[in-house]
Image (spheres, helix red, strand yellow):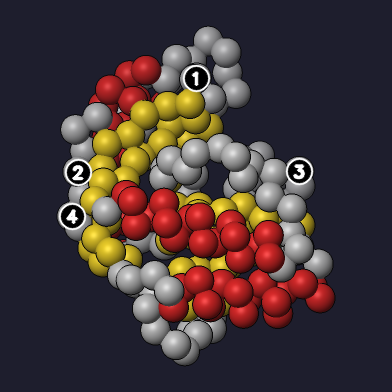
């Protein structure tokens, strides 16, 4: 199964971001981008790729330990940018060092569980993907500029989530991956919380 660790923003933060995305979709050529759905908005901490079912219990135990060792912290969705002309993203503001520390712990948990981390030497930069572009003539600079001053309301990150990525349905135009929270752990606490929810 294809897994990753993430921080899931709460519903009010997603609502604010949805209002901003609605404005972005009014920009020229917005209809030529592939916009991610609100249910796919998350901050990836560590991407694990394909994980064998027999590795899952060890990974979960290590993620539970990682969560216990990290305190809750303040975050908000703020700003944004682009990766070349391929991706439009929203950024994060607040206790970014704590976010980076949680990401490092999530990656270390996977390595200790025997999962190879392909991007382990890349510096962590929290971002939330809003749209993807596969049209060479569409330039994303106006979208990055429009996001520059966006600032959502702060919230307290209190959980580390383990997510499963289901690929998009084949043969369906515009189909998106589906993400499922399979477990989560409170930061600084001792008991896991299984199942979906924010």
Residue 170, x across and y down, in percent: 76, 47
Residue 167, x across and y down, in percent: 70, 53
Give the mark, 2 or 3, whose residue is nearer the N terminus. Answer: 2
Furthest residue toward top: 137
Residue 33, x across and y down, in percent: 50, 29
Q: Mark 1 points at which residue?
A: 85
Res 179 visible: no
Give the mark, 2 or 1, whose residue is nearer the N terminus. Answer: 1
The reply, left or right, for residue 99 in relation to residue 168 is left
Residue 151: which disc? 2
User: Splitting the image into 4 quarters, where does residue 89 fall?
Assistant: top left
Give the mark, 4 or 3, whose residue is nearer the N terminus. Answer: 4
The reply, left or right, for residue 135 in relation to residue 68 is right
The reply, left or right, for residue 174 in relation to residue 55 is left
Which residue is more in the foreground, 61 or 31?
Answer: 61
Residue at the spot 27% in from the left edge and 36% down from the top edge = 79
């Amino acid at each position: 199964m294809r897994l990753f660790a993430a921080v899931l923003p709460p519903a009010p933060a997603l609502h604010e971001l949805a209002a901003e995305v609605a404005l972005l979709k009014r920009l020229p050529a917005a209809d030529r981008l592939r916009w991610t759905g609100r249910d796919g908005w998350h901050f990836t901490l560590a991407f694990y790729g394909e994980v064998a079912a027999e590795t899952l219990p060890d990974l979960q135990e290590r993620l539970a330990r990682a969560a216990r060792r990290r305190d809750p912290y303040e975050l908000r969705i703020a700003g944004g940018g682009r990766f070349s002309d391929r991706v439009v993203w929203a950024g994060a503001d607040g206790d970014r060092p704590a976010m980076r520390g949680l990401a490092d712990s999530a990656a270390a948990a996977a390595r200790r569980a025997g999962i190879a981390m392909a991007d382990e030497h890349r510096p962590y930069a929290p971002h939330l993907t809003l749209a993807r572009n596969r049209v060479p003539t569409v330039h994303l600079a106006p979208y990055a500029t429009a996001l520059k001053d966006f600032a959502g309301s702060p919230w307290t990150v209190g959980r580390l989530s383990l997510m499963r990525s289901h690929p998009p349905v084949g043969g369906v135009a515009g189909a998106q991956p589906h993400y499922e929270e399979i477990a989560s752990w409170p930061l600084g606490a001792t008991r896991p919380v299984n199942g979906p929810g924010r």
